[in-house]
Amino acid sequence: MGRPGFVLEVDDRTPPLLVPDGDRFQLEKFPLGTRVIYPAESLARVPDLGEAINAALDTPLDSAPLLALLKPEMRLTIAFDDIGTPTPRMRRPDIRGKVIEAVLSRAAAAGVDNVALVSANGLNRRMTSEELQYLVGERVFRSFYVDGLLANHDAEDTDNLAKIGTTVTAEIAVNARAASSDLLIFVHLVAGPPPGAAAIAAGLGSTATIGQLSGPQGPGNDVAAQIADLVTSAIPIFEIDAVLDNDVLAPPVEFLGHREWEWSLKDRATWFGMRRGLEWSPQRARRRLMNRAEGNYHATLVTAGSPAAVQRASQAQIMAQQRVEVSAAADVGVLGVGAHIPYSVDSVTNPILAAWSGLAAGFSSHTGTPFVRPGGALILYHPLYAEFSPLHHPSYVDFFTDVLTITTSPERIAADYEEKFANDSWYVHLYRTGHAFHGVHPMYLWYQTAAAQRHCSDIVWVGADRESAARMGFRAASTLADALEIVASTVGRTPSISYLHSPPPVLVDIK
Amino acid sequence: MTAAPADSDLSVQRLDGRLRDLLAGKKIVMTGVTGFIGEQLLWKILTELPETRPSVLVRRKGSASARERMIAVVKKSIFNDLRKAAGGPAELLDTRVEVIEGDLPNVPQLPSDLDIVVHCAGDVSFDPPIDQAFTTNVIGTKALLDRMLEAVADESGQLRRIPHYVHISTAYTAGRRRGAILEAPHAHDIDYDAETAAGIAMRDLIEEESRTSAQLARLREDAEREHRQAGFLTTAADTERRRIEWVQAELVKAGTERARSLGWTDVYTFTKALGERVVTDVGQGVYVSIVRPAIVESSWLHPYPGWIEGFKMAEPLILAYGRGELPEFPATPEAVVDIVPCDHVVNAILAVCATRPEIGEPEYYHVNSGARNPLTFKDLYTYIRAYFLEHPFEGGPRGAARLPQWTFPGASSIERLLSTSDRAHKLAERVLAQMPRSDRTRKIAKDLDRTRVRLDFVRRYHTLYKEYAQSELHFVDDNTFALTRALHPDDQAAFAFDTAVFDWKTYIQEVHCPSITAPVRRMEAIRSKRGNRPTTMKDLAKDAAGATAVAIFDLDGTIMSTNVIEQYLWARLPELSRTRQLAEVGRVVRRLPSYLRAEQRDRGTFLRAVYRRYRGADLAALERFIDTSMAPHILSRLSPEAVRRIREHRAAGHTTILITGVVRPLTRPIQQLFDVIVAAELGVDDEGRCTGFLSAPPLVGESRAAWLKHYATSHNVDLDRSFAYADSHSDLPMLESVGNAVAVSPDIPLMRAAHRNQWSVVEWKIKPITPRWALPT
């Protein structure tokens, strides 16, 4: 059992602190009095993963044991999270594979023949065969992939989408194989607060279905709940959750997640070498290096059973792992955007993804109240190079070039451009046959940054490409001191500052 | 300064009356009226000599008849008042000017009532081809005189009236003589008929030489070095262009050398000198005056101070200096620049017209400033420099240019500097040709080109003006000075031509420089307003061509960063075992030099050589492999800007075409973007295995243009409204065949062609995220 997270107040003795900055790290000297929110160390891991999985499957929450649910003639579908969860990717073997193997061995014992596996990638890019193999393990891959029984979900494949009901706004359609199954087993790795049963629609739904969960105002609670109800009532679901610990970084760089004053001599030497190495290597090499990083995750809890019960258990465990109590929201929030973003695995972190990671993922990692007060300022670290992967993010380039130059308003974007991007045949083609994120994907991410933009009066990026920052409606500063100078007009010369020291992840809980 | 000669010394006949009265009722036949001096001469006659009857000999130019050309002349602003008074340009001509359409030397019949002939037509260039110089200055002059004599002769050949022939020559007919040049014939005994015959014959001689196999081979090789990849027709067109240029250059050289061998600086002054001799010989029985102006520049007073038409001798130099592009000049600082304002020349000509020389005793007049108001090179430089320091050119985004400070190091040191620069430039060019294509090489090439233009400019003017800028000629102008003194007091205001009346500082800084820089400044203002960009990269949202236009794209290097060898390795290696992979890579690497040689020679040969390696590949399997495994490799090397542009073309309703030497299966991942794909087709045997041969020749170079033209006719496409995008010089014919060509990250020859043709040059960045050596799996 590790130490809980805590809040450090910067004083004279505080060393410079680590700040992720794209595919680099900075050591930043923060002003005296800055509150630094440190994540908790990992909770105790399950002693034996195999045993924990078996236990979860055999004594599920609010459900009969899995074996009892399996019948020889049934259609069984196993859905699982795609390569974007968790980031950085998990060191082999992936827990998903372990869980799936356990499920399959029970299915075999029960004589179930009709089994298919589908990744719940929603509008994310199709995974490559190597990535699929990485997630499910070599044995499962070998048995299912060549027969087409292990596949990516395709939100545009109208022949393989089934309507399961209608919400107040539109009809809901999900993967036909999943919808027509007698049992859908959903294997989920929990690295943050679980999103609820609507996640199944977000991973396996049609483009229109996912669109209802992704409007500029965010999903209305009732729509999300309606969809969750529709899904759970239409499909019998058996959910298996594995909650991950905070060991986001694997040796030899695991010390980056530790508290700076506790770095050993060896850590410091590694840091020195790493920093020089990253500085001197060209951007592409740096990116490749960062893309290769892996997390040393372990499960701290495995549960199975009815989605609602499992999610409650996971929620509680995540709170125990990630919650850090903070006394008050600050005038100025600081956070660094690192290289590992769910939508840029093995790819390029473009400015929109960086903005999403900072403003949507980082900023909204709280239990109800953000760590910056309303009207406060947010300072982020990322270079925001206007670089895009033509393979993975073709519509992002166009969104960045053609749309953001005209408007950054989510409402206007939704009204004027969303449909065009959603129905664009070239994007659809690349999404379905290449490895591209769906055409409308950048907009959905952009909408998610809106809450932070409304909440904060100033958003400043340190060390960022000025043109990219300006295009997205932000400001750029060369140093933290300059950024504080810029925001002084709204928060004054002596603001209270909080630095969210992450990764590993932190759930801020304002008292 | 020479003291003004006393009136009693004058041999000139006195002008006893005002010019308007002396020339009243006279018919003056004029040549060269569309030129600089002629235009003002006509204006002066129409304005100041109401009863004089000008009659102008004008040649057709293209489809414009003589009358149409004259209408254009009198539409110019200096004729505004005259035009208004007459009621229009046509009316002005009808009431005051007789237009005779004709040419030199094919002069038509001249009016029989002519009194005076003023011949001021001629080449203004110092270095015309030798045959042209003789035709204009000797044969043309003789023909004009002959026609004049015919016009005033009766059937028996007796002159009915004795006309006055006024010949406009140049002070520099003195050639390489030194010291005082008198207003008298130059002493020489050259047989102008023989010289003319020889000069004219040079054209045939040199034409013939240019067609010898040795010469043609040399020219073709030069053209091939630059254009081989673009194809035979482009090379041929360039060879012929080079031949014509060569003939021209040789004729110029022949002229200069002949002139120098006889004591003249260039063929212009040489033939002008022979022309004077023709005039005195043929005009023995009539009144003859010869006016020899020095360097004629903008007007001092009339029609307004600074009036000038077109650019004369000094303007390009002054403007280049103002732009900071003339580092030094081969002048002797103390040498006299003999400039004379245009209105003084015009006035002098009209005053000469009113004189009556002795028959058989031609009068000579030097119209110049050097004798009594000399301007040294040093002073000229000082005044011009001061002018530009006070009124610099805006000079674009980097502000005004730095003005060079001349030290007048002398011609030989400039010559040395020039040849060193030339050698350095050639060396840099050779190095550049070997450098890989990149932003930086393009920038270097641009700088080199700019240097080349400047070097050529300096060299050209150096050669042309070297002698003039160092000449120690002293033109005596006693006759002319006497003539201006002889003007009636009431004529002094309008007709005086005493070059001692103005000071040079005022003339240069307040009259001449403002006048000649005005158009440049206007252009600058327009340019800074609209930007200086060529605009073939049009905004497609405003394009209305729709289905009548196509947008044609090259693949390699334009919309994608790969090459056929790389593609081949991607496509073939994954199916081989590790050891066989290595062996295959080894074989390809070994053959690389020969592939590169083939590519240099002819892209088609190169493609065929590489595609030979596909022999034995199963085409269906290859296609499957490309769809599943190679597509990401190909898509990740697509330029986002290119894709956006292609999609914009589609949105505008254009037909999008991909034309490439790549094998068709490799275009599969991007076929959705294009309506038509033209690619190399791999031939297959009965079992579906590739034979290593193509089923049709690959479309490269000119065959792309031919294909496009054929496609356009068969599909009703308007090529002028169409677009083409390519990166290499071999695509030049294709780019040339459409109205909107865009060079994409071009190689240097294409960049130069784009610059010449005013095409947009865009950079479509392609940064693949996977390294080159990563194989599809």
Image (spheres, rainbow, N blue to C red):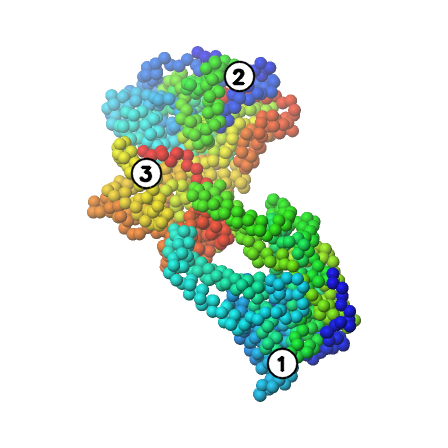
- Look at mark 3 in the image and give the residue it sits on: B589
Residue at mark 3: chain: B
In the image, residue A280 lies at what x, y percent? 47, 27
Same chain for the residues under marks 1 and 2 in the image = no
Q: Is residue A98 above or below residue B660?
A: above
- Look at mark 2 in the image and give the residue it sits on: A325
Question: Which quadrant would the C terminus of chain B be assigned to in this image?
Answer: top left
Give the residue type that dot 2 points to.
Glu
Between marks 1 and 2, how big is the CA–CA gap? Answer: 121 Å
Residue at image x 43%, y 37%? B767
Is label 1 or label 2 in front? 1
Residue at image x 53%, y 16%? A325
Residue B285, label in figure = 1
Total numbered badges shown on the rendered structure: 3
Between marks 3 and 1, how big is the CA–CA gap? Answer: 87 Å
Q: Are marks 3 and 1 in contact (CB under 8 Å)?
A: no
Q: Is mark 1 on a helix, strand or loop?
A: helix
Residue at image x 32%, y 44%? B594
Give the residue type that dot 3 points to.
Val
Q: What element carries label 2?
A: strand
Between marks 2 and 3, how big is the CA–CA gap? Answer: 63 Å
For the question of whether residue B82 can be seen, the reply is no
Q: Is residue B299 above or below residue A300?
A: below
